[in-house]
């Protein structure tokens, strides 16, 4: 199953981030980096209730992992789902592999896509707090 | 801790693009697509008109892009460049695909 690590965003402490790293998630290192930089803080009991929970999904979704992703999304009801990195967004560099599912949105609705292979820690924070230079679509 | 440089995105200078397709061929994730057509340009004194490619549409799918910069490196005309101050996430899958106008609007750092 997924690791149930939970963090709060340093600049928006009422925002809880639940991390679901899949089997192949080199993007997990960027989350660790955000923690080491103090941008994400491990949740403590004294933090109180969160206003909003974001389920951060990173890693390549392969067909055997589909039930794991479904379970992860169902385990955090009401959370908004963030596809973190190219693999979680679209399948990334492996999009044409036969057993790769082209993004978390083929399994569950995604509320925010963070591009990058991997995205930088500050891109993660920007996406979490809704700071972005470009939004929406062009096509 | 000092602030780290941002990752940035890849911007396009459409006037410098000759639609040679080298970036499209070299991209490891096939995230670039390019439409172009050819036009005949008659030049005074020339014996026959010259055929030139005209760029119609250039898109980068940042959902697939690895930000490896190979396209920037291989472009013979420096029509692609890093725009280091731009960073973004999208609320929808199509929002990760940026076309000519957006790519051209991103600031070029030189």
Image (cartoon, coloured by chain):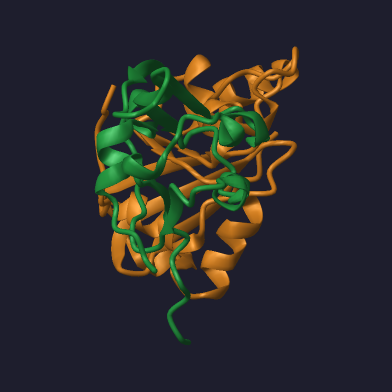
What residue occupies the far bottom of the structure in this picture? B1
User: Which sits in the foreground, B7 or A24?
Assistant: B7
Viewer can see residue A43 = no
What residue occupies the far top of the structure in this picture? A98
Q: Residue at x 29, y 44 (%)?
A: B104
Q: Quadrant location of the C terminus of chain B? A: bottom left
Q: Residue at x 34, y 40 (%)?
A: B14
Left or right: where B1 falls relative to A125: right
The hue in which chain A appears in the rendered picture of the protein: orange
Query: Chain coloured green: which letter?
Result: B
Viewer can see residue B33 = yes
User: Which sits in the foreground, A17 or A133?
Assistant: A133
Q: Residue at x 58, y 51 (%)?
A: B69
Q: Position of residue B50 (x, y in %)?
A: 42, 23
Q: Residue at x 55, y 46 (%)?
A: B75
Q: Is residue A79 above or below residue A46?
A: above
Q: Is residue A30 above or below residue A130?
A: below
Q: Quadrant of residue B100?
A: top left
Q: Position of residue B98 (x, y in %)?
A: 35, 33
Q: Is residue A93 above or below residue B41?
A: below
How many numbered discs, if any? 0
Q: Position of residue B55 (x, y in %)?
A: 36, 26
Left or right: where A9 falls relative to A96: left
User: Which sits in the foreground, B51 or B19?
Assistant: B51
Q: Position of residue A121 (x, y in %)?
A: 49, 61
């Amino acid at each position: 199953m997924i690791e149930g690590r939970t963090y709060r965003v340093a600049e928006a402490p009422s925002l809880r981030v639940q991390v679901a790293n899949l089997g192949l998630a080199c993007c997990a290192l960027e989350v660790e980096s955000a923690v080491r930089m103090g941008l994400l803080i491990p949740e403590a009991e004294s933090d109180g209730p969160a206003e909003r929970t974001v389920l951060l999904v990173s890693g390549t979704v392969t067909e055997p992992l589909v039930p794991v992703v479904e379970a992860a999304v169902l385990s955090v009801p009401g959370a908004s789902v963030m596809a973190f990195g190219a693999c979680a967004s679209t399948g990334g560099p492996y999009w044409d592999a036969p057993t790769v599912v082209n993004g978390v949105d083929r399994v569950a609705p995604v509320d925010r896509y963070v591009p990058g292979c991997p995205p930088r820690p500050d891109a993660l924070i920007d996406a979490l707090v809704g700071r972005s230079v470009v939004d929406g679509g062009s096509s | 801790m000092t602030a780290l440089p941002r990752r940035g995105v890849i911007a396009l200078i459409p006037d410098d693009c000759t639609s040679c397709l080298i970036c499209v061929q070299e991209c490891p994730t096939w995230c670039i697509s390019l439409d172009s057509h050819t036009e005949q340009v008659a030049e005074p004194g020339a014996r026959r008109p010259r055929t030139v490619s005209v760029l119609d549409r250039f898109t980068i799918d940042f959902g697939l892009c690895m930000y490896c910069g190979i396209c920037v490196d291989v472009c013979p005309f420096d029509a692609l460049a890093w725009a280091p101050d731009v960073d973004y996430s999208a609320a929808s899958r199509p929002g990760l695909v940026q076309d000519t106008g957006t790519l051209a609007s991103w600031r070029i750092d030189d």
